[in-house]
Amino acid sequence: MEGLLYLEDGTFFNGRGFGYQTTKVGELVFNTSMTGYQEILTDPSYNGQIINMTYPLIGNYGISNIDNESDGIYAFGLVAKDVCFTPSNHLSVKNIDAWLQENKIPGVWNLDTRKITKKIRKEGTIKCVISTEGISIEQAKKLCDNTMLRGDYMKFSGTDTMRHISGDGHKVAVLDFGVKENILKELNKRGCDLYIFPYQATAEEILKIKPDGLFLTNGPGDPEQATEAIQEIKKMIGKVPMFGICMGHQVLALAAGGQTYKLKYGHRGGNHGVYDKDTDKSHITAQNHGYAVKAESVILKGMEITHVNLNDGTVEGMKHRDLPMFSVQYHPEASPGPNDSSYLFDKFIDLMEGSRK
């Protein structure tokens, strides 16, 4: 099966296709994780994106029944240098080719993923076409030119109706922008009684359950397009302790009166160094985001920067100086990735405990 990756600037790469026979248009990004392709592809934060994996071999341990982060694949496509179609792993139930076919997702392999990554690093993320249907370059160009990328995926990547995961501890309202299941598991194993609300939920609906805390989840897209959620979060600031992760971090900043901006090529992978000013320690973190918070914009609104990225100095965490709310840009549940930052879930529990007194 032929595979094609066509970039908006006219650059194209011919390779071999696998997965589902189809054509998709999305934003081309790269991920530096050495493992975790199943968790990455099923992370709703990748909705609308085509992932170029920098690690050269993908699929070698197959697909399991326990590693999905959601109900299916949210990424629009997968780009790899080499793919293993005969995995070796006692938990594997199928290979990545069959899995992509089941989820109707195209993949292209036998490409120079290093060259693609270097291009993204130099020029930034770019719109692209991925195809396994044998389309021509002219057809790919026309499709790319005529397709607009969306920035509001967070509005429909989460639950449609309120979900409940019972626990015997703190009652936590979760505003779902496209949450990873392992984030919910981290909260639940600490006893949290979780009420997961859809994007459209109002402050009145959320506060009606009298939560001990509000958790703002990860999710895809441009945070500035989450206009409805930002307005509802504003109404709850100071009324309930808040913890935001990734998209939740960004919308909390916007709700507090701050600003966000688009990064050149984002942070995606399981090996990003972050410095925690409060503990005076550095951690290796898992990240997946294309936007960041402007430090000066939130500092002027009563926020204090608590975490910074050790590679580029961008904001990785913040807390309010007087109100019970904090957030981080990265993924402390680490699926995939290191578990250095799981202490942040305990910090949220402590914050709710303190607000009860």
Image (cartoon, rainbow, N blue to C red):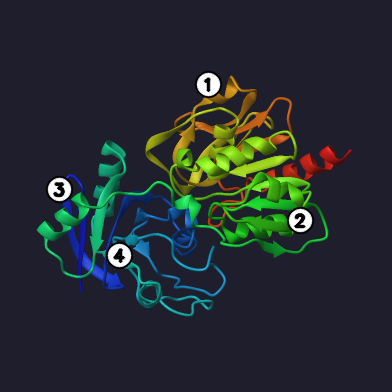
Which structural element holds mark 2? Answer: loop
Which structural element holds mark 3? Answer: loop
Disc 1 from disc 3: Cα separation = 38 Å
Marked residue nearer the N-terminal end (2 or 3): 3
Q: Residue at x 65, y 23 (%)?
A: 302
Which structural element holds mark 1? Answer: helix
| Quadrant in which the N terminus appears | bottom left
Marked residue nearer the N-terminal end (1 or 3): 3
> Quadrant of the rendered structure where residue 135 is?
bottom left
In this image, 266 relative to 232: left or right? left
Q: Residue at x 49, y 29 (%)?
A: 259
Q: Of the residues shown, which amino acid type is indicated by label 3?
A: Gly
Place of residue 190 in the rendered image (x, y in percent of width and height, measured from the top left): 76, 55
Residue 328 appears in the figure: no
In this image, 338 relative to 345: left or right? left
Disc 2 from disc 4: Cα separation = 42 Å
Q: Which residue is mark 2?
A: 192
In this image, 122 relative to 351: left or right? left
Place of residue 106 in the rendered image (x, y in percent of width and height, measured from the top left): 31, 67
Q: Residue at x 67, y 44 (%)?
A: 203
When the figure is inspected, residue 351 is found, relative to residue 185, above or below; the finding is above
| Quadrant in which the C terminus appears | top right
Q: Which of the numbered marks, if any, corresponds to residue 10?
A: 3
Q: Which residue is mark 1?
A: 296
Q: Nearer the viewer, residue 28 or 170?
A: 170
Which structural element holds mark 4? Answer: strand
Q: Which residue is mark 4?
A: 82
